[in-house]
């Protein structure tokens, strides 16, 4: 495949209902998919194994940030890996968006490409979620420094120098703000690319609460000022 140097990292926690479909879609465009089963209590690991994707398992649930770090470490150890995509397991991301973001990383020489729900219109985002996501952007000094329009999208592309440097220490959902903070303090070239999210009943049930999203950024903002 043309993206043979690209690895897709999928953190997984209790996604047996959809994970085989998510992986199958990814495998139509990417040769290398690694799923990190983060201590799932359901049959997620068996569903992943049946797809032929790479499978790494945490014995206990450690959080999405830890799963992403494990997946990045695994992919970095594979020969020829140069680009790394993070992709949610609940079916909300589209493979075509990931392919386009990889192309942006290649053609625009971007170190990091972040998916944005707000470029090219945001009708896809439910009104209340849109309000809270906008508030997160307004509340976070690091997001404003990077001039981002969307701070908590799990679809990202990193090149190898960035992936080798990242050390995600926040194991819960606060890792998204932590990544943005790391990027804001670096000299890396960061680009945004428009993405479309599938807000299904299933993906809504798996997402973090909107109030928790604001609390994460508020806590990190206080930490940045200390």
Image: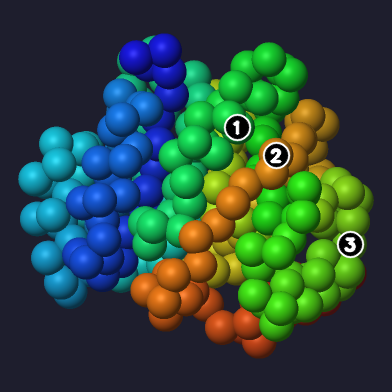
| Distance in Å between CA atoms under marks 3 and 1 | 25 Å
Q: Are marks 2 and 3 in contact (CB under 8 Å)?
A: no
User: Residue at 15% across / 72% down in the picture?
Assistant: 42
Q: Quadrant of the N terminus?
A: top left
Instruction: Please state the horizontal and vertical placement of residue 186, each as a whole percent of the image.
Output: 79, 37
Mark earlier in primary sequence (1, 2): 1
Q: Give percent across and percent down for residue 108.
A: 74, 19
> Considering only order in the chain, which callout, 3 or 2, is on the residue closer to the N terminus?
3
Q: CA distance from mark 2 to mark 3?
A: 21 Å
Q: Residue 186 vs residue 17: left or right? A: right
Label of residue 193 in the image:
2
Location of residue 72 by image quarter: top left
Quadrant, the C terminus: bottom right
Q: Residue at x 50, y 60 (%)?
A: 198
From mark 1 to mark 2, how far is it between C-alphas? Answer: 6 Å
The reply, left or right, for residue 56 in relation to residue 96 is left
Q: Is the residue under label 2 in contact with that under label 1 (CB below 8 Å)?
A: yes
């Amino acid at each position: 495949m043309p993206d043979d140097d690209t690895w897709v990292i999928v953190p997984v926690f209790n996604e047996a209902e959809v994970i085989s479909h998510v992986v199958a879609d990814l495998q139509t465009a990417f040769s290398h998919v690694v799923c990190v089963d983060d201590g799932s209590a359901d049959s997620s690991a068996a569903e992943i194994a049946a797809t032929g994707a790479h499978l790494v398992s945490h014995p206990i649930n450690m959080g999405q940030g830890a799963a992403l770090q494990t997946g990045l470490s695994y992919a970095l150890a594979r020969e020829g890996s140069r680009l790394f995509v993070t992709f949610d397991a609940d079916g909300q991301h589209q493979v075509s968006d990931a392919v386009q973001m990889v192309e942006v990383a290649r053609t625009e020489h971007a170190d990091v490409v972040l998916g944005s729900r707000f470029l090219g219109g945001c009708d896809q985002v439910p009104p209340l979620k849109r309000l809270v996501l906008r508030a997160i952007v307004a509340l976070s000094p690091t997001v404003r420094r990077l001039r981002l329009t969307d701070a908590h999208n799990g679809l990202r592309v990193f090149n190898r120098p960035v992936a080798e440097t990242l050390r995600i220490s926040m194991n819960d959902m606060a890792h998204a703000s932590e990544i943005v903070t790391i990027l804001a303090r670096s000299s890396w070239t960061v680009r945004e690319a428009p993405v479309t999210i599938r807000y299904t009943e299933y993906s809504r049930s798996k997402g973090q609460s909107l109030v928790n999203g604001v609390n994460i950024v508020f806590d990190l903002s206080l930490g940045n000022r200390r």
